[in-house]
C-alpha cells in the first residue's frame, strides 16, 4: 500500500507532466505572451488543488488518469490568480515560489495579459471537456463559478476593501476565507464528486473547512514564516494592515482556531463513503506546513 507522500507525489507529478505537455503546445504571438504564461505555470508549487481533484476521483473509484485536462485547467486558473495577486495594485509582491513574480520578469502589462490568457485558455480546455457529457459540463461550470464574481474574485475584492478598515472583523474575514481561498479548494473536490456521482454536499463541507484552514495557516505563516520557506515576502499583511486572523484574534488564538478547523475537516470526512486516509493526510499537511 502506498504511503501518503507516495500518493501525493504521484498525483502532483502527473499534474506537472500534463502541464509541461500542454505548455509545449502553446505558441502564441508575440512570443513574450507564451513565455510569460509558461513561466508562471511551470514555476512549481504544491499543486494542492489538482492533487485534491485527482485524489478525490481516485477515492471515488474514477480513473483519474483520464481526467488530467481538468487538473490542467484548475492549475491554470490558480496560476492566473497568483499572477494578478502579486501585481502592485493588488498584494504587490516581488516574489512567488522563491522566484521573481511574473510582473518583475515581464512587466506589469505583460503580467496582466499572461493572467488573462491563462484564464481564457483554461476555459477553452473546459469547453472541450464539456463536450464529453452532462457531468463534465456541470463540473466545468462549477469551476468557472468558483473562480468568478461570486467566488474567488469576490474574495479578492473583499480582501482589498477591508484592508486598513478598523471596523472589519470576524464576519468579513470569514467571507474572505470562504471566497478568496475556499472556493478554489472546494471546487476540485466538488468537481470530482460530480464526475463520480457522489455526495456533493459532503465534498463541499470538507472543502470549505480545508480552505479556511489553508488561509488561516497562511495568515499565521506571514507572521511566523520565513521568506525562504514561503517563497514570497513575509510580514506584508501587518505592514499593509490586511484583515487576517492574526489581526482579528491574535496569534495564539489563531493557532488554537487552526487546530479546531483541522478537527472540523476530519469530522467532515466522516460523511465520505470511501477511504479518506489521504485526505486526513492533507489536513495534517496543511495544518503543519511551514511554506
Image (spheres, helix red, strand yellow):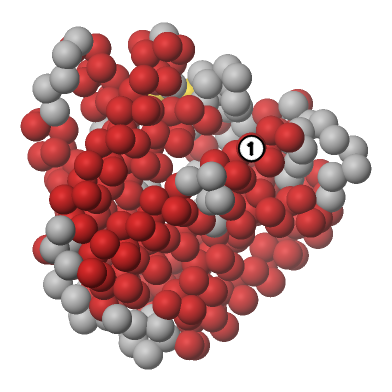
Q: Does 175 appear above or below 35? A: below
Q: Residues within 10 Å of mark 1 (few under 14, many from 20)?
A: some
Residue in front for this viewpoint, 73 or 8: 73
Q: Does 229 appear above or below 284? A: above
Counting from the top left corner in percent of width and height, residue 254 is at: 75, 57
Q: Does 55 appear above or below 144? A: below
Q: How many marks?
A: 1
Identify the element where label 1 is drawn.
helix
Where residue 39 sits, quadrant-wise, is top left
Q: Is residue 214 visible?
A: no
Residue of label 1: 157
> Is residue 197 rendered to the left or right of residue 155?
left
Residue at position x 10%, y 31% in the image: 24
> Is residue 290 rendered to the left or right of residue 6?
right
Q: Is residue 109 visible?
A: yes
Residue in front for this viewpoint, 101 or 130: 130
Residue at position x 69%, y 71% in the image: 260
Counting from the top left corner in percent of width and height, residue 183 is at: 51, 56
Counting from the top left corner in percent of width and height, residue 9 is at: 25, 57
Residue at position x 30%, y 28% in the image: 117
Amino acid at each position: 500500500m502506498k504511503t501518503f507522500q507516495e500518493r501525493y507525489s504521484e498525483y502532483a507529478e502527473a499534474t506537472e507532466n500534463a502541464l509541461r505537455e500542454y505548455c509545449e503546445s502553446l505558441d502564441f504571438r508575440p512570443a513574450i505572451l507564451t513565455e510569460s504564461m509558461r513561466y508562471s505555470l511551470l514555476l512549481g508549487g504544491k499543486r494542492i488543488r489538482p492533487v485534491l481533484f485527482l485524489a478525490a476521483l481516485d477515492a471515488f473509484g474514477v480513473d483519474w488518469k483520464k481526467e488530467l485536462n481538468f487538473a490542467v485547467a484548475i492549475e491554470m486558473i490558480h496560476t492566473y490568480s497568483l499572477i494578478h495577486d502579486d501585481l502592485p495594485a493588488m498584494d504587490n509582491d516581488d516574489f512567488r515560489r522563491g522566484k521573481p513574480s511574473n510582473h518583475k520578469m515581464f512587466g506589469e502589462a505583460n503580467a496582466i495579459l499572461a493572467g488573462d490568457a491563462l484564464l481564457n485558455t483554461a476555459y477553452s480546455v473546459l469547453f472541450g471537456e464539456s463536450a464529453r457529457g452532462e457531468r463534465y459540463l456541470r463540473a466545468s461550470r462549477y469551476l468557472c463559478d468558483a473562480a468568478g464574481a461570486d467566488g474567488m474574485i469576490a474574495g479578492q475584492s473583499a480582501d482589498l476593501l477591508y484592508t486598513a478598515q478598523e471596523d472589519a472583523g470576524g464576519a468579513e474575514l470569514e467571507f474572505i476565507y470562504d471566497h478568496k481561498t475556499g472556493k478554489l479548494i472546494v471546487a476540485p473536490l466538488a468537481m470530482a464528486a460530480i464526475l463520480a456521482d457522489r455526495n456533493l454536499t459532503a465534498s463541499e463541507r470538507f472543502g470549505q473547512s480545508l480552505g479556511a484552514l489553508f488561509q488561516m495557516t497562511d495568515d499565521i505563516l506571514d507572521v511566523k514564516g520565513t521568506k525562504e520557506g514561503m517563497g514570497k515576502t513575509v510580514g506584508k499583511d501587518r505592514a499593509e494592515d490586511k484583515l487576517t486572523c492574526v489581526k482579528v484574534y491574535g496569534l495564539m488564538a489563531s493557532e488554537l482556531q487552526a487546530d479546531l478547523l483541522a478537527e472540523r475537516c476530519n469530522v467532515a470526512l466522516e460523511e465520505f463513503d470511501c477511504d479518506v486516509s489521504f485526505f486526513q493526510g492533507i489536513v495534517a499537511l496543511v495544518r503543519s506546513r511551514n511554506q
